Image: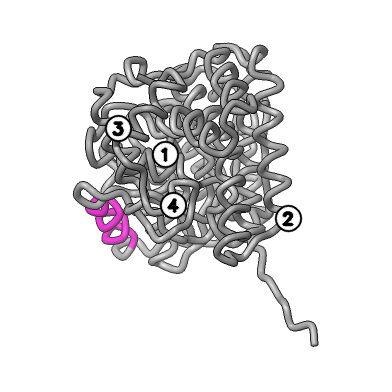
Amino acid sequence: MFDKSSWIRLPRNVLVGHGVLDRTVDAIEELHLHGQPLIVTSPTPRAVAADRIAEDFAAEGVDPVIIEIEAASRDSVERVIERARTVDPGYLIGVGGGKPIDIAKLAAADLHRGFVSIPTAASHDGIVSGRASVPDGDVRHSVAADPPLAVIADTTILAEAPWELTTAGSADIISNYTAVADWRLAHRLKGAPFSQYAAALSEMTAEMLVDTADSVLPGLEESAWVVVKALVSSGVAMSIAGSSRPASGAEHLFSHRLDQIAPGAALHGHQVGVGSIMMAYLHGGDRGMWRNIRAALESIDAPTTAAELGIDPEDIIEALATAHDIRDRYTILGDGLERSAARELAQETGVI
């Protein structure tokens, strides 16, 4: 008897394009959200977008509460939760890059409130996914949360964000290639649940970035449009799968381990991009995919070497040899690489 079922939770409104920040209030009204909004942001995104949103709400007779956070941490999440308990908001809005959006997402889940995502940088696929990553001491946890009810991504703002943030988002998408390869491997060898539809969507998203990498250029709204649509698609793939598998494999374990070894040395997206080069080599050797990934990253000025990441080559070796211990998820790393094999891998791919 067929008894399979699934519950796919997706954003109900996704606005992407020129000037859509001005439609924030209308987009939220369509969600039938009620009560006072609590806007979670940080100093630069506040000046760029959050204050504008607050003014638009005020013009409609709604007085939002704004809270600024400085760091991505569990303490920041607790601070938002405490503030929310004093004002009892109807819903939360995350405005900014990875930090405000992930913190708002986790706080909203704890408070059982709706959440709206308004990115000011196309830096990672967390803008639409049901996952959040916040450091706790020297460990970065990726935890499940509800996906946003709406995503509002204004390309006029995204195009003006620091270019390195856009290249980090692009690299994060390109790394979907190896994430899906690991997912298939885990399905074949360990019986891990697998969604062909989610895998195909994730791979298509990565392929779109690789094929158009030479046209992703700084300061262009069209480039911001391409990258943010890819980030949205990647987040949707995770929602369909019910896990981060379509966008997180050994390259993410490598990045999380680097965060422990060399905290703050490089952006997450850049680290997973470099990790993806090496994991693609392990999956395919000299069959070319790792070279295509490397070429695409080079085309958008994303790092492809330890030196460009600003990370000591020995830290790369350490991360490769120990990344498999980060979480119980089967990948191409298996039960770990010998350090000699890790060194050879990094040298063969030009990472060190």
Label 1 vs 4, first from the N-terminus = 1
Provide the secondary structure element on which disc 1 rests. helix
Does residue 234 belong to the magenta stretch? Answer: no
Instruction: Give the CA separation, mark 2 to mark 4.
Output: 22 Å
Callout 2 crowding tier (Cα within 10 Å): few <14, some 14–19, many ≥20? few
Q: Which residue is denoted by mark 4 in the rendering?
A: 334
**Distance from the alpha carbon under mark 3 to that under mark 1:** 27 Å
Q: Earlier in the sequence, mark 2 or mark 1?
A: 1
Magenta residues span 74-84
Residue 134: give x, y in percent of width and height. 33, 49
Query: 341 and 52: which one is in front?
Result: 341
The alpha-carbon separation of the residues under discs 4 and 3 comes to 16 Å
153, 244: nearer the viewer: 244
| Residue at the extreme right of the image, as rendered | 1
Residue at label 3?
317
Residue under numbered circle 2: 196
Between disc 2 and disc 4, whose residue precedes? 2
Residue at (47%, 48%) from the top-left corner?
A: 93
Is 291 or 263 nearer to us in this picture? 291
Comparing labels 1 and 4, the label whose residue is closer to the camera: 4
Q: Which mark is residue 98?
A: 1
Instruction: Tell me what residue is drawn at x 43 percent, y 27 percent.
Output: 270
The image quarter in which residue 12 lies:
bottom right
Query: Amino acid under label 2?
Result: Gln
- Confirm whether residue 71 shows in the render: yes
Badge 3 vs badge 1, beta-carbon distance below 8 Å = no
